[in-house]
Image (cartoon, rainbow, N blue to C red):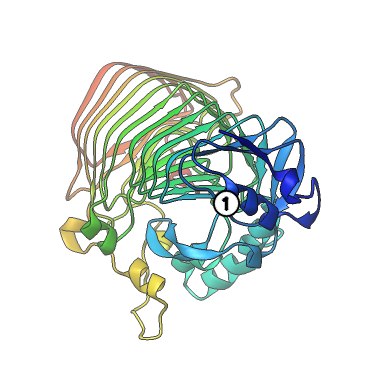
């Protein structure tokens, strides 16, 4: 077992020149059991591809700085927001590997601002988002605006991710897809802004544990998904046996199941997590063309401070994004066709059942903060079944709304909500 220092292969620690080739040479030279070391310094890189039975060590003071040129990211077959398609590789990619470890106190920095501006302009009102929205293509822009992720684990097993920092990703920070036996521990995610800059996405994976992570981002903090639309429903690659515990969630949208639910989500344990100033706490989102299911979910021992929506469950989420309103055209790209092919009819209504939420406190530090205790909107035709809240204490502005539920059970639930529930607050944009 040897250590291979990337400086030996000509990597530039000043980020003045691109070090992708030197980094990849070190990785390719490694034999089973070897460690590739990224020492202190700042290394500019495009997409890198790890291999089985190796460790990537990010030393103290080490920064892998993502290139801001799309050409430096190889276009590969992957999954993006529930759709299997060609897309730029991440900065670090673990594809079809076993027994890979990334560890150390170093940093992966996506330099995301250039990618964010490409999506929504400098003022968050322009860019491709404004163009596509004007043409009634809001549902396609997230897929057409190609932005690198910081770290992707794809079709891999026995993966360990420890201690490093992921920041300023152009798109999702850490994406696990079609993988199993993955451990993420003591990771910090820190995105100052940006569209779709999720912290950790667990996508059609099994046996995943996320623990002692700290996350601050501009979308879902930790999200469990299983594909979008008819193709994902037919694949039926379920996310199951997921544990999320002892994490601290700051800016962001909390712990979310969905909106990509087509392959099913089951047996998720969310416990001993702390939320500080997040937009949402525990969240479920889906749409009427997703299908799939969410079941056997245990949520317990959560502490929420200044959280706007402690419980946000919406099964007709964000229609402009969720539904392609145009008729399919012969010249549409394949990924547009896949987005358009949802799960039709009653089968498209996600089956949500057996959700247990216990021992949660939600408090506000000032009267100036808006909070709604419950915002739950199931489907009338296929309501959420067996939703159980016990030992809950919530301090909020509004009580909120609960609809579309069959067998709602409340045991020892205390809510302080002095204000009238107002329909203008029925909006959460992330």
Extreme bottom residue here?
Answer: 330
Q: Is residue 341 above or below residue 358?
A: below
Q: Is residue 242 left or right of residue 118?
A: left
Residue in the image at 55% along x and 54% along y = 90
The x, y position of residue 3, in whole percent, is 63, 35
Q: Element at badge 1?
A: helix
Q: Is residue 50 above or below residue 347?
A: above
Q: Quadrant of the N terminus?
A: top right
The x, y position of residue 25, in whole percent, is 63, 53
Q: Is residue 226 left or right of residue 245?
A: left
Look at the image and tell me whether residue 312 can be seen. no
Residue in the image at 25% along x and 63% along y = 230
* Circle 1 crowding by C-alpha within 10 Å: few under 14, some 14–19, many from 20: few
Q: Is residue 139 above or below residue 169?
A: below
Q: Nearer the viewer, residue 36 or 308?
A: 36
Q: Nearer the viewer, residue 420 or 427?
A: 427
Q: Nearer the viewer, residue 22 or 198?
A: 22
Residue underneath mark 1? 28
The x, y position of residue 256, in whole percent, is 40, 39
Q: Nearer the viewer, residue 94 or 25?
A: 25
Q: Quadrant of residue 416?
A: top left
Q: Is residue 66 left or right of residue 316?
A: right
Q: Could you tell me how many numbered marks the image carries? A: 1
The x, y position of residue 116, in whole percent, is 64, 57
Look at the image and tell me whether residue 397 can be seen. yes
Residue in the image at 31% along x and 48% along y = 315
Residue in the image at 42% along x and 47% along y = 97
């Amino acid at each position: 077992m040897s250590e291979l220092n990337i400086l030996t292969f000509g990597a530039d620690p000043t980020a003045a020149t691109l070090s992708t080739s030197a980094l990849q040479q070190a990785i390719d030279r490694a034999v089973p059991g070897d460690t590739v070391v990224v020492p202190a310094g700042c290394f500019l890189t495009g997409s890198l591809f790890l291999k089985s039975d190796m460790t990537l060590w990010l030393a103290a003071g080490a920064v892998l700085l993502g290139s801001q040129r799309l050409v430096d990211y190889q276009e590969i077959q992957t999954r993006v927001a529930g759709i299997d398609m060609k897309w730029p590789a991440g900065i670090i990619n673990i594809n079809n590997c076993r027994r890979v470890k990334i560890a150390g106190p170093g940093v992966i920095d996506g330099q995301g601002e250039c990618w964010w501006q490409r999506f929504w302009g400098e003022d968050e009102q322009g860019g491709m988002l404004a163009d596509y929205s004007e043409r009634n293509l809001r549902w396609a822009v997230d897929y057409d605006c190609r932005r690198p992720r910081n770290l992707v684990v794809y079709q891999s097993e026995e993966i360990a991710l420890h201690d490093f920092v992921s920041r300023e990703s152009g798109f999702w920070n850490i994406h696990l897809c079609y993988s199993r036996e993955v451990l993420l521990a003591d990771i910090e995610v820190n995105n100052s802004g940006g569209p779709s800059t999720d912290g950790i996405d667990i996508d059609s994976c099994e046996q995943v544990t996320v623990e002692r992570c700290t996350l601050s981002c501009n979308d879902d903090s930790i999200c469990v998904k299983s594909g979008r639309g008819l193709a994902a429903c037919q694949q039926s690659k379920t996310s199951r046996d997921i544990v999320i515990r002892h994490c601290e969630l700051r800016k962001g949208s909390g712990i979310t199941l969905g909106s990509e639910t087509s392959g099913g989500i089951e047996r998720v344990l969310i416990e001993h997590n702390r939320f500080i100033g997040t937009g949402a706490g525990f969240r479920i989102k889906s749409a009427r063309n997703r299908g799939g299911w969410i079941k056997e979910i245990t949520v317990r021992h959560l502490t929420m401070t200044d959280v706007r929506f402690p419980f946000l469950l919406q099964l007709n989420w964000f229609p402009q994004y969720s539904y392609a309103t145009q008729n399919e055209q012969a010249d549409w790209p394949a990924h547009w066709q896949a987005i358009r092919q949802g799960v039709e009819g009653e089968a498209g209504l996600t089956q949500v059942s057996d959700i247990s939420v216990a021992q949660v406190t939600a408090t506000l530090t000032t009267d100036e903060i808006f909070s709604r205790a419950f915002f739950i909107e199931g489907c009338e035709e296929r309501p959420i079944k067996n939703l159980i809240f016990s030992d809950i204490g919530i301090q909020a502005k509004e009580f909120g709304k609960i609809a579309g539920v069959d067998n709602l059970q409340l045991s020892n639930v205390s809510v302080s909500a002095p204000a009238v529930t107002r329909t203008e607050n029925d909006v959460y944009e992330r």
